[in-house]
Structures are given as structure tokens and as C-alpha cells.
Image (cartoon, rainbow, N blue to C red):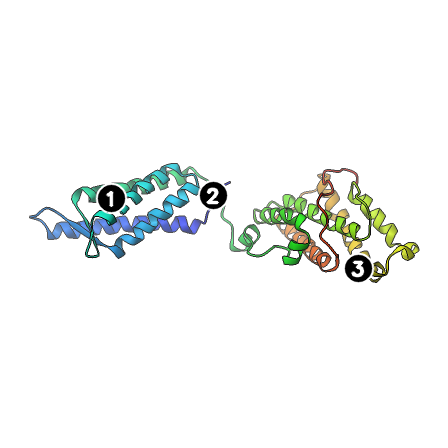
Amino acid sequence: MLELEIAELSDAIRRVAVSAQHLHTVHAVSVAKNLNIEPRWTLTVDEIAPLHRAAESLVRVAADAELDATHEAASRLLSLLDLLKQNFLRDGLVHIDENNYQRLNDYLKQTDTAVGDQLRSRYALMLSASDKRYYLPKEPLFGAQVFDRFAIANDDIAEAGKCLALERGTATVFHLMRVMEVGLRALGKELGIPYAPSWESYIKQLESLLDGKNYDKLTAEQKAKRDFYRDVLGDLTSIKSAWRNPTMHIVRSYDAKQAGMIFGVVGSLMDHLAKKLSADPSSGAISTGQSSL
């Protein structure tokens, strides 16, 4: 998939069109003033600068967007503009003879045609301003503490954001459940529970350890945080039943609104975990492909 800032492409196309129209105006005025002598036209540096910037933008954007014909046409236009500025710039004016005027006019038309033809063969999706903040966030989506403390989950958090921006609700929830597994495993590590093959295995061991009958087995620090552990375990169990199991077993799908709500819930829980747990979980992950729940 190609990604680009549509405003830059739009601005470059507009500048080419405006410059082409301006060149025609200059030509018409020059011809009117020079009916009996060889035509000669001039453009100021300030007049040619926007066209030069537009050509530069088109060359760059066309390369990023794989618009080959546009890139070739814009490159020819840019090369000619460089040549004119280098060889025909005197006293702040770019002097254009008839031959170079015709070349410039032709290159402007070719560039405009190439852009139009190639854009008609493409299909673009535009993100709203609110969706863009999920697709290209300026800050970590779940906050800096989660980003630093649960680095192993960063890829899935980023992918969940992109899927949410593109309104792929079920894919969003899938990635969020992977994020939750990181939190579950971190909680297990905090309480000395070894690797388990599924959420169910972790949850059963956590429930047993936090049961009142096993209170004496906890360290003093763990006893002080027991209410926190039980609250988090309750949240994880609820999420497992409500969203994780149905998602992994293809029982249900989610629209963007539902996924956005789940995104907020998971983000809040991960932020809560990051403030309380002692360390980032070690590398490795619980397999989300396990069917045993």
C-alpha cells in the first residue's frame, strides 16, 4: 500500500496549472507588445519559483506513489526549469526565447496530462483527521509508560491503531487481544507463574494463587498489591469471555464503533498495569493461535 500526503500532491498539481495559465498570459501580453519583432518573454524569479517547487514536489510524490509517467514528465519539467534558471537568469529575470517557451509549454501540458491519466487509474482511501491520529499517532497510542514498560506489545498496539483508522474492527480486536496477552503474561511473571500455553492456564493459576486459602504464600509486597491483582484478573477474565474467545473462534465480528470502545478499554487497562507492575515482560509471547481456552 502506498502512503502519501494528499495535500502535497494537490498543491503541486494546482501550482502546475496556475503556472501554465500564467505562462499563457505572459505570452499573450508579450505578443501584443511585440507584433513587429521577434517575440521574447521574461519571467521574474518570484514567478518561476512556485513552478519550480511544484515540479520538485511532483517528482518526489510521483516517485513515492509509483506514478511513473508523472515522475518522468515532472522530471523533464524540473530539468528545463533548472536549465532556464542557470543559463537565462539575468538581472532577476529569466529570459525565455520562443524555443524554450514552447518546450516549457509542452512540458507543462505533458505533466498535467500524465497526472490526470495516472490518477484516474488509481483508487485512494482518505483518512479523516480523527482517524489519522490512530494511523499516524504523534505519541504512543496507549501512552509513554505502556510503550516503555510493555515494548513487546508496541507492534500490535500500532497495528490495532491502523486497523481502527481503516475501520477494520475485527482485525483491531484481534491485535488488542494479543496486547492483552502481554499484560496477562506480565501479571503471571509478577506472581512467579511460569509460561502457560493459553489464557485459561494463566487465569486458573492466578485465581488459585490469589485465593484466600493461599494468602500466606504471597510475599509482603504481593499481599499489599493483592486487591490490584484481583481487580486486573477480573478485568482480564471479563475481556476473555466477552471478546477474546468470540474473536479467536470466529463467533463474531466487530464494526469500527465496537472496536473503538474495546480499544479504549484495553488502553486503560494496559495503562493501569504499567503503573503497577514491576518490569517489562521478557521476550516471547503466548501463542494467540492456541485453541485451548
Circle 1: residue type: Leu
Residue indicated by mark 1: 104
Pointer 3 and pointer 2: residues touching (CB < 8 Å)?
Answer: no
Please give the name of the residue rendered at 27% of the width and 57% of the height, measured from the top-left corner.
46
Crowding at dot 2, Cα within 10 Å, few <14 / some 14-19 / many 20+, comes out as few
Pointer 1 and pointer 2: residues touching (CB < 8 Å)?
Answer: no
Quadrant showing the C terminus: top right
Secondary structure state at the residue bearing disc 2? loop
Calculate the distance from the C-alpha at mark 1 to the C-alpha at mark 2: 30 Å
Q: Looking at the image, is 230 positioned above or below residue 123? A: below
Residue 206 x/y as whole percent = 83, 50
Crowding at dot 1, Cα within 10 Å, few <14 / some 14-19 / many 20+, comes out as many
Instruction: Write down the quadrant of residue 63 in the picture.
Output: top left
Is tag 1's residue or tag 2's residue first in the polypeptide sequence?
Answer: 1
Crowding at dot 3, Cα within 10 Å, few <14 / some 14-19 / many 20+, comes out as some
Q: Looking at the image, is 274 positioned above or below residue 293? A: below
- Give the label on residue 228, or none: 3
Q: Nearer the viewer, mark 3 or mark 2?
A: 3
Q: Nearer the viewer, residue 117 or 285?
A: 285
